[in-house]
Each structure stands twice: as C-alpha cells, then as structure tokens.
Image (cartoon, grey):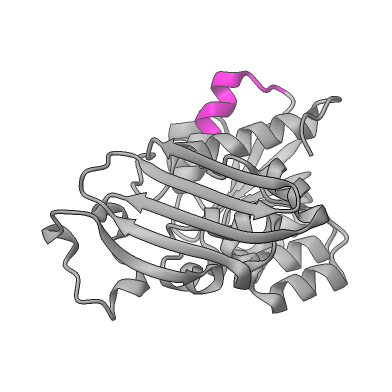
C-alpha cells in the first residue's frame, strides 16, 4: 500500500515512527504534501527518499492507495472531497470537517474513493454505532484537559478566562457538537466522531472543562437508548502536542492494520 500524508505535524510523525516500529512492510510512505517542509526534513523521520508535494494535483498524479489527512479541518474540507472524487481513498484525522453538511453532500454525491475515519480517542465507537441502529435518547461527552491544551481556541475569545491563572476546574464550553468543533477545533475531534457514530452533532451534548489538576486528556461518554445505558471514561496521554492525544494517532495505525489484514475485528 502506497501512502501519502497531507500535513507533517505531530500526527504524521507518530504514525511514521510507529509504522517503523510495527514493521508494517506492506505499507510504504511515498510522499508528503506540505507547503513548508523540505525533503531533508522528511528524511529525519522516514530515512528514505520520499516525494515532497506542494500541490494537490501532484498527489492525484501519483495515485497513492491511501492519503492520510493529518493537517486541520479546513485542509480536510478543501482536499478530501476532491481526492475522493478522483477515486483516491482518504483516512482523515480532522473529523470535525465532516460535520459540515456541504462537505458530506459533496462526498456522497461525487466520491468514488472511500473515506476512513479512525475511532481516535473515542473508547466505545462500536457500541455507539450498534446502539444507533435501534435508537439513542441521550449522548453526553464531558472532556477535561489541561488549560495549556486549550490555548488558541476560538471559543475562548468571548470568555473572561485567563488559562494560565485557572486554579481549579472551569467549564469553558457547553453546547452541541457543531458548536464545540467551531469553538475548539483542535481539541474535540472526539465530539465529531461521537456525533457521526451516533445521533448526529445537534443531539450530541458536549462539555469542556479546563482543569489544572489533570495531566491527561479525560473524556467521559454517556449514552442512553433502547439498548440500555453506556458509560465510558478514557484518560489519554497527550502527544508532544498537548492538544492531541497519543491514542488518536495510534488509532490510525490500528485502522491501517485492518486495511491490510484479511481479518477485521469490530464493526
């Protein structure tokens, strides 16, 4: 499987390093699309000659088996539908992009490639998908993160909150998943994944708490429906980027393993 990255940040670095550790010889990284990196920089991680692309048309011409979008929501909206319309499969890490109905309509109408969204930090995605078959009455996500992980979020601009002065847990957001993704686009991919797996973003309730006492990204899921009741909490170690949980990148590796394996576990 020939693989191209869009974006060369924390996620791409973790995936690239993990592919080496896991000795997944069936997967070959052949290129990176990023406007600022150089081939010398990519060799620092991959230790091999790969192509550095500056234009999406170069990726289309290369025709990789899979593109991993690991940039941001706006890049995902711009490039994913186009790649899919050209028959190129995409694994996208910026799940919030797909809460935009225009993006999803374009994908459904024009895609000939397949879009893969890994479970990321969501600990119970299969259970939520199964529950949605019969009916879900309530979905609640409560996220606790260190204040440092929330720096730069657009949702903080209207709040009278100074992150570096928070001494005890402080609720910085309450609303639905669409509002959460707009307010904290680098922090709540899990809210988008939960929405897509369950009852949609308008019925997915999200609370975000800045908590100086925590050292991990903590997500608590509550789902109630015809199936019964689900409560699940995951405490995620942050990656080098405090906004991103390590398990988000590891879930991409797990999905890659599924794609090359004759056996698939889970829905």
**The N terminus sits in image quarter:** top right
- Which region of the structure is painted magenta? 16-25
Image location of residue 114, percent across then percent down: 81, 53
Image location of residue 203, percent across then percent down: 62, 69
173 on left or right of 54: left
Question: Predominant secondary structure in magenta?
Answer: helix
238 on left or right of 19: left
Is-magenta flag for residue 21?
Answer: yes
36 on left or right of 229: left
Q: Identify the image quadrant of residue 160.
A: bottom left
Image location of residue 149, percent across then percent down: 31, 53
The residue at the point 54 percent across, 27 percent down is: 18
**The C terminus sits in image quarter:** top right
Is-magenta flag for residue 173?
Answer: no
The residue at the point 63 percent across, 18 percent down is: 23
> How many marks are shown on the rendered structure?
0
């Amino acid at each position: 499987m020939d693989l191209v990255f869009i974006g060369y940040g924390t996620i791409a670095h973790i995936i690239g390093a993990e592919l080496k550790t896991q000795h997944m010889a069936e997967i070959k990284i052949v290129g990176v699309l990023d406007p600022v990196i150089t081939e010398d920089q990519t060799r620092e991680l991959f230790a091999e000659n790969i192509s550095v692309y500056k234009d999406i048309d170069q990726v289309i011409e290369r025709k990789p088996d899979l593109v991993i979008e690991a940039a941001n929501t706006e890049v995902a909206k711009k490039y994913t539908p186009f790649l899919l319309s050209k028959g190129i499969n995409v694994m996208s890490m910026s799940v919030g992009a797909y809460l935009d109905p225009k993006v999803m309509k374009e994908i459904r109408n024009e895609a000939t490639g397949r879009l893969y969204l890994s479970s990321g930090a969501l600990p119970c995605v299969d259970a939520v998908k199964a529950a949605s078959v019969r009916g879900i009455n309530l979905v609640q996500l409560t996220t606790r993160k260190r204040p440092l992980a929330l720096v730069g979020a657009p949702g903080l601009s209207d709040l009278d909150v100074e992150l570096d002065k928070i001494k005890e847990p402080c609720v910085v957001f309450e609303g639905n998943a669409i509002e959460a993704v707009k307010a904290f686009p680098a922090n709540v991919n899990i809210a988008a994944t939960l929405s897509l797996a369950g009852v949609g973003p308008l019925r997915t309730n999200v609370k975000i708490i800045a908590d100086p006492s925590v050292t991990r990204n903590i997500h608590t899921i509550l789902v109630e429906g015809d199936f019964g009741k689900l409560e699940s909490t995951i405490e995620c170690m942050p990656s080098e980027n405090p906004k991103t949980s390590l398990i988000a990148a590891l879930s991409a590796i797990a999905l890659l393993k599924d794609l090359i394996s004759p056996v698939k576990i889970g829905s």
